Amino acid sequence: MIPQDFESWKYCIEQKCGIPLTLPFVQGRLAVYENEELPETKRFISKYGEQHYWRVREWFARVAMDLAIAERDI
């Protein structure tokens, strides 16, 4: 099942997949997803569709912002 909301997506990435959403990881994903000409990005869009692609980009951007704010406050 493909997560349809931020909290479900975040849970899936962190808990089910065991991938920590660190700032370097998130920035790396954003670098890929922000370039629609990359083969990886094209495959993602082809497999999951434009709507989900934009949601995931937004969710990664949200996590990046939250992490940057948290690091700044340390």
Image (spheres, helix red, strand yellow):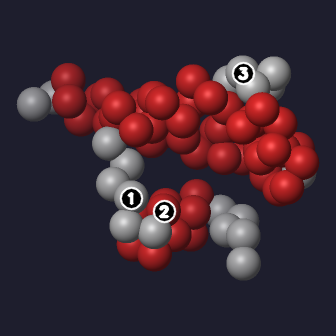
Could you tell me residue 42's position as x and y percent? 83, 36
In the rendered structure, which amino acid carries the disc numbered 3?
Asn
The vertical placement of 36 against 42, above or below, is: above
- Taking the image as shown, residue 2 lies to the left or right of residue 61, namely right
Rendered residue at 72%/70% (across/down): 2
For residue 72, which quarter of the picture? top left
Q: Earlier in the sequence, mark 2 or mark 1?
A: 2
- Taking the image as shown, residue 20 lies to the left or right of residue 7, namely left
**Residue count near mark 1 (Cα–Cα under 10 Å), binned few <14, some 14–19, many ≥20:** few
The vertical placement of 51 against 5, above or below, is: above
Residue under numbered circle 1: 19
| Pointer 2 with pointer 1, Cβ within 8 A | yes
Rendered residue at 78%/32% (across/down): 39
Rendered residue at 66%/46% (across/down): 56
Could you tell me residue 52's position as x and y percent? 79, 52
| Pointer 3 with pointer 2, Cβ within 8 A | no
Residue under numbered circle 3: 35
In the rendered structure, which amino acid carries the disc numbered 1?
Ile
User: Residue 13: which disc?
Assistant: 2
In the rendered structure, which amino acid carries the disc numbered 2?
Ile
Q: Earlier in the sequence, mark 3 or mark 2?
A: 2
For residue 65, which quarter of the picture? top left
Viewer-closest of 19 and 58: 19
Is residue 66 visible to us here? no
